[in-house]
Amino acid sequence: MSAFQVHISDHTITTPGDAPNVLVAMNPAALRSELHRLVDGGTVIVNTDSFEERNLTKAGYRSDPLTDGSLDQYKVYEVPMTTLTKDTVAPLGVKPRDAERSKNFFALGLVSWMYTRPSEPTMAWIDEKFRQKPQIAAANRAAFGAGHAFGETAELFEHPYLVRPAAHQPGTYTNITGNTALAWGLVAAGQLAGLEVFLGGYPITPASDILHELSRHKNFGIRTLQAEDEIAGIGAALGAAIEAARIGGIEKADGSGNISYDPANHEHMVRIRADKVAGIATDIPPVEVTGDVDDAELLVVGWGSTWGAIDGGVNRCQVKGHKVAHAHLTHLNPFPANLGEVLARYPKVVVPELNLGQLSKMLRAEFLVDARSVNKVQGLPFTASELEAAFLKEMGS
Amino acid sequence: MTDVADHVETTAKDWASDQEVRWCPGCGDYSILKAVQMLMPDLGNRPENTVFISGIGCAARFPYYMNTYGMHSIHGRAPAIATGLAMARDDLDVWVVGGDGDMLSIGGNHLIHALRRNVNLTILMFNNQIYGLTKGQYSPTSEIGKVTKSTPFGSLDQPFNPISVALGAEASFVEIFQNCNIFNDGAFAAITSRSARDDMLIPLVHGKPIRFGAEQERGVVVDGQGRAAIAEVAEVGEDAILVHDEARPEPGLAFMLSRLSAGPYEPTPIGVFRAVERADYGTETNRQLEASRDKSGPGDLSALLHSRPTWSVD
């Protein structure tokens, strides 16, 4: 069983969304595992064809949730999606297994109607995705159209929603994943620097697409190696980057580079290497503060993939009249040169992390600041509402 | 590798660094270092186009003593680092140096994958059948029952046969018998001592019957079980002696020869077990890059950025 969450809005959004308003449950197992995430009073669309005794038992239901009243707090729409899809695609002559698979597009068509989404981009995407399999493309188009038409004609649904376009910066846009963006960034970096790109990697979901994407662009002179393990991937990248010199783990004398067994020289070299790393702080950009830069009562410090949820949480606190600032780190060692000064500027500092407080410990050790941890270790991202609550608590409201 | 036409004149001295060589007095590594420094002029490469990459262990100090580029890298990973270098720089002559622990224990995985990919590397494994740097534990090539500090009642592990491992990993391989006089003295004395050499070393010469002994009186035959075995030439006749063919596409013959001696006290084949032509990994990588440029033209960044459906916001 797998689940996908989609978040659409008429303003800029930075997270996959907190609690869904609509849950499409293709089978009882999906309903059981995902229902708790739905907002109170939310909408549940179920594929009734899969709500047979056997599937209910397999999912751990003792009685049918569609009839036992357990879904009373939700708006439930019962749609025989498998049957409707099969009836729709049968004239196209697709195999029964493929016909059954098209029910996902029936559901997408139905939800697209509910939210008044244009059909053309999805149709174009289907044609592109299944270019090599025109029959399946036709089946998916038909199923999508049938779902859309069902929403319009069945009179089950109270009213469709309209989500107006969000305001975006002028420019040319394309739809890509973060992995593709990273791969293209590496291609661009190689082109602009006049250097050949080498990627050593080992497949791991979800990062494998970086290797997949880069391995397609050999005409850019990009070499990829699917190594025997991750250490080999990193090692091969280091090897490909060797420029010059004789380097290695035995201590060298300062200046000459000769092997040295002098204890004092060893400490001296350890210190100058530490200084060398610290000196990188002058080459990296200072950390930028957003939000209420001048008069925030709370500074939120984050790093990496928590940016969207922090941004959402900060915005919600601001809407409620609080003064909150946000600093997001890209460089962790060394820290940006201005970080100490930034931390000292605000009365309270909070550090949301999807671990037990790795960054907050570093900030406390490095800057002697009372950086408070907000932690979550569930294999799930923060939601904006979770962080909003945590920030409000730190601000005593 | 450098063509004969580019042969550069150097001497062994050009390949020796100014660093003080530090191994235990009498260590076999000194002889290997000397031998490699004397070999390099014959290969005709330039020191500045040569790189030695090592892992961790006694043998891994090698790069410091060669007047070439080098990297004393991380434990067991030298073949992986060298793979990246050989892929990115086909103008360099890349060597990997390690011991039996570095190459067959912590780095066993990297070794076999470098071999099967046929990366353009020369791998030297110094096999002294012991852990020397950590002061005497058994290694992946130590014989069963080896009594060491970590195996006071004798080791239980079946050792690797390095030649068999290399052949199983689809490669040719160089093995050097090296004596660790401190922790495993005399490991190979049975076959390398002056008195025993003629009887214990079986030279493999391509296209020649495999014979040995002071009078060439013994030879290698294939016995009734399909195994390589040692026989008296006078008893089996000259025609029964196996003729070495290092170029056979199938590795069966080489593998059979690699299993001829069950341990360091039996006659042992030395020389080239297998030498077959295979395209090397770096060359094949470059061939794909060129084919892609021929087909799609050189990379165009703007075209890439617009390669998926786009839309404009005014």
Image: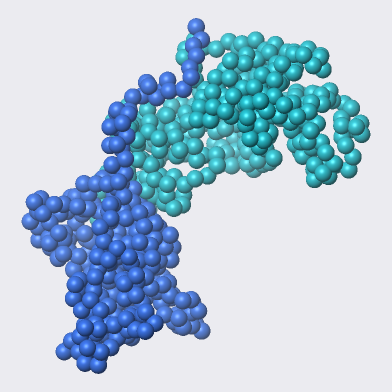
Looking at the image, is A23 positioned above or below residue A258?
A: above
Q: Judge from the rendering whether residue A148 lies leftward or rightward of residue B247; answer left or right.
A: right
What residue is at 21 percent from the left and 83 percent from the top?
B239
> Residue lying furthest top in this view?
B314
> Looking at the picture, how far across and down is residue A328, in whole percent?
55, 28
Q: In this rendering, would B174 be left or right of A337?
A: left
**Residue B221 image point, x, y percent:** 29, 82
Colour seen for chain A: cyan
* Depicted B148 relative to depicted A226: above or below: below
In the rendered view, would you say A291 is above or below A222? Answer: above
In depth, the one of B134 and A192 nearer the eye is A192
Q: Examine the image and state in which quarter residue B165 appears.
A: bottom left
Q: Which residue is drawn at 19% across and 50% down?
A: B49
In the rendered image, the quadrant that contains the C terminus of chain A is: top right
Tell me residue A318's x, y (percent).
67, 17
Quadrant housing residue A150: top right
Q: The blue chain is which one?
A: B
Residue A252 visible, this angle:
no
Q: In this view of the protein, can residue A102 be seen by the observer?
A: yes
Q: In this view, does B164 lie to the left or right of A291?
A: left
Name the image quarter holding the N terminus of chain A.
top right
Q: In terms of depth relative to the viewer, which is nearer, B300 or A108?
A: A108
